[in-house]
Amino acid sequence: MLVLVLTHALAAVISPFLSRRRAFYLLALVPASAVVVPAVATHETYRWVPALDLTITFTMSPLRGLLLVVVGGVGAVVLAYCARYFPSYDSRFAAVFLGFGAAMTGLVLADDLLLTYVFWELTSVFSYLLIGHSAERSASRRAATQALVVTTAGGLAMLVGIVLLGHSAGTYRWSEIAANGPLPGTATVTAAGVLILAGALSKSALFPFSFWLPAAMAAPTPASAYLHAASMVKAGVFLIGLLGPAFAEVPGWRPVTVTAGVVTLLLGAWAAMRQTDLKLLLAYGTVSQLGLLTVALGAGTQAAALAGMVLLLSHALFKATLFLVVGIIDRTTGTRDLRELSGLGRAHPVLATVAVLAVASMAGVPPLAGFVGKEALFAALATDPPVLVAVVAGSALTVAYGLRFLWGAFATKQEVSGFQPVNASFIAPAALLAAAGLATGVLAPWLDHLLNPGAGYHLALWHGFGLPVLLSLVVWGAGIGVHAWQRAGRQWPARLLPTGESAYQRVMRAVDRTAVEVTGASQRGSMPFSLGLILVTLVVLGGVTLLLGAPRPAGLRLWDTPLQLVAGVVVAAAALLAARARHRMTAMILVGVCGYGVAVLFVLHGAPDLALTQFLVETVTIVMFVLVLRRLPVRFSARPLRTTRWLRAALGAAAGLVAAGMAWAATSGRTAVPISVDFPDLAVSYGGGHNIVNVALVDIRAWDTMGEISVLVVAATGVASLIFRRSSSLQRRSAEQNVPTAEAGPGWLRAADTPEAQRQSIVLQVVARLVFHTIVLFSVYLLFSGHNAPGGGFAGGLVAGLALVTRYLAGGRRELNAAAPVDAGFLLGGGLLLSVGTGAAALVAGGEVLQSALLDLYVPLLGHLHVATSVFFDVGVYLIVIGLVLEILRSLGAELDRVHEEATS
């Protein structure tokens, strides 16, 4: 079963590399393989997140197997249909379609409720992409957003219900929860049931969430046939059918499901009678049929559940058929408006026959599958007259709008124009589904054996004359009468009840208006105002928390040594002077003093690694400031009024006090043993090194470091994108970076003849070249010694970056390119690839991601070496940091220099 999900995902990845329309036929084999899975699979479990006891667990049951066959079979047919529907191969549609198929397959098979939720949300994301496939159309974008918002909101409610249910039951495995019999009607379980129903109702477009489904008809017709007939909209009713037996005795479950189903059945059918667009008519008909499925699967009896499964299968077959027929009509005539269509039945009798078979199944005409399901449902609801009457009324309207569809699409109503011929391969997918609906009805006993419901009622094409047959006759007669009444020129009345669309629109308008007002009030384009807003929030929330709920520390130790007091006074004094400085360079130097003072505090606390990193970061930061400040005015702009200055000072002092108080309360209020107490032993036994900080970064907490270096890569790319904003700049930059070393200048002083170098001291240039290789060699030493001594990839990369800084300051951008004739992006990407590859290699070797191994090697000349594989991860960090510094130098330095030279020349 996992192989089936992964096969869908792999096909989605491969599909963009295909090019011909025939590729749709090849891709159709992937979902088609799902048809055989129910016969060979039962249960699979794989470890996922052992620390949280999360597993990837798949299981099989009659309902799961039935829906899996529907999802796979209809998906395969629709993909084959796409080979004729699209004028050329649409790789994006194929990839998203198969991605959705993978998510839907996982949802059907998942036994763990949390895993079910993961696939549930993935179907929402992929359906958003399918509905909004025509991104250039505003209607598609709006419909996709609406479907995503509604289904995701319901999914979040469902997640809360799943957590409540799993916590109450002690497990998230649905098979284990259901094995204990009906759930108790406690308050927790009742709340869980209501929240889960919110997700199910929104996913299956049940009242009051029905409005998003008709709007989703902006999707391409193949997507509508798959999502809105066979798969996505079935997810909610599937969940109701799956959970129904266990929730049968929980208060509110049956009333909510049956009431929502009945209302949706009637309102959807009523709205379908008003539609003139064939696709919209089918959309509202789908809403109505989903209500019928909810009534059947939520009724709480085995007989009704059996009827619901048959109706689920028959609905997928006839509704997918009708959507495919509408796609053919649209492609053939250029319209879906039933008022403009005429004579199509005579022009294409095969297409009309396929549509008649599908509508007959929808209307419950024997010997089709729809008849078998309707008869079973009528028999199951015989003991519940109110619900039975509502179902009969809804079924009569179903007959009426089915006849309206046939009349509107195929009847001869006016002058008949010429029609394009329809290729047999275009009709074949729809014909196959219609024939499957006929075969399913004829083979009802065989279907009854497969579903194995254990109910007193068994599926059959004929049970003798009784109440179900009588009700079917009533349904057909009433439906024909309603259609004839409408065809006599009667105006169909307006909708019976308001839908949730108006409420949705009001909520979205309120959200948009609130966002505009909040943004206008808080984001004025002023950095002092934005920073002040952040600090005010910190002071208010943090201060209130400290006053009301923070632990009260027993004692206060101001310092361990007087030197800490000295360093703290220096930092505080530098900060105060920086706030009052008038010159930008002065303020920058004072801020640097604050950073160096913090590094001294690290040293006094016995953290040489942190101190080294802080010193290096502060130095590189000062260089960045200098590169920018040289292009800015020497002095700050006019200071604000005295009152404003006092307010800013008070806010700064308050923020400092609150931050200090939060740090004090956090450290003093600890009750558990810190996890770091085990790091010294783990650093040696697990990471093979004595430098606890470095081992923690590249081994124990390597995932954190992976996230940090990814942010560094993104930041470097963002800096370059802001500076190199013109294509000409990018071209010049690339040319400069790839200038051969020989062109940079003659002799040892590579850039000595350039204007940039001639402005610098010759002594500075000579010294920079003399110490450059020594600094780089020292950076490599820090890289490889960091596992057992202060250093590591980050510190080593910063040292190498400072070596490049000296070359740039000595000779300008040409000197920098001579020292590092490599693209910064190559270093960034290569470093990230190396770090990720190290983690993947551990996985391939049979370990966990980013797990390291200890190697004892003997190398000639070097002797015995004790190496941890995490050093390769550290090398990736080293390259990324060098690439970041190089990107900054070339953007904030070299590019700004070039722009300045062009402006002054």
Image (cartoon, helix red, strand yellow):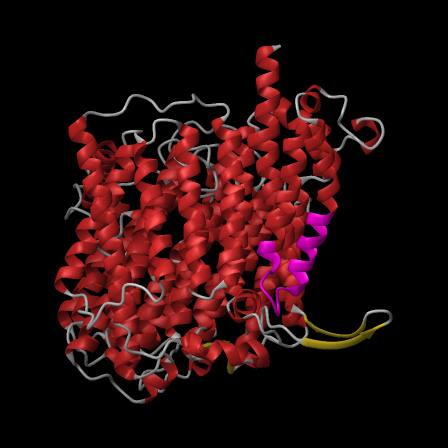
Q: The C terminus lies in which quarter of the figure?
A: top right
The answer to whether 784 is drawn above or below residue 486 in the figure is: below
Q: Where does residue 640 sit, x and y in percent of width and height?
A: 23, 25
Instruction: Give the residues drawn in magenta, as a range.
Output: 774-795
User: In terms of image quadrants, where is residue 888?
Assistant: top right
Do we see residue 111 in this rendering?
Answer: no
Q: Main secondary structure of the magenta part?
A: helix
Evaluate whether residue 19 shows in this view.
Answer: yes
Give me the residue at 35% from left, 33% from top. Answer: 339
Q: Is residue 763 magenta?
A: no
* Residue at x-position 51% and y-position 83%: 42
Q: Residue furthest right?
A: 860
Q: Position of residue 66 (x, y in %)?
A: 45, 72
* Quadrant in the picture for the N terminus: bottom right
Q: Residue at x 23, y 72 (%)?
A: 192
434 or 509: nearer the viewer: 509
| 783 within the magenta span | yes
Residue at the front extreme? 562
* Residue 18 drawn at (x, y percent): 68, 48
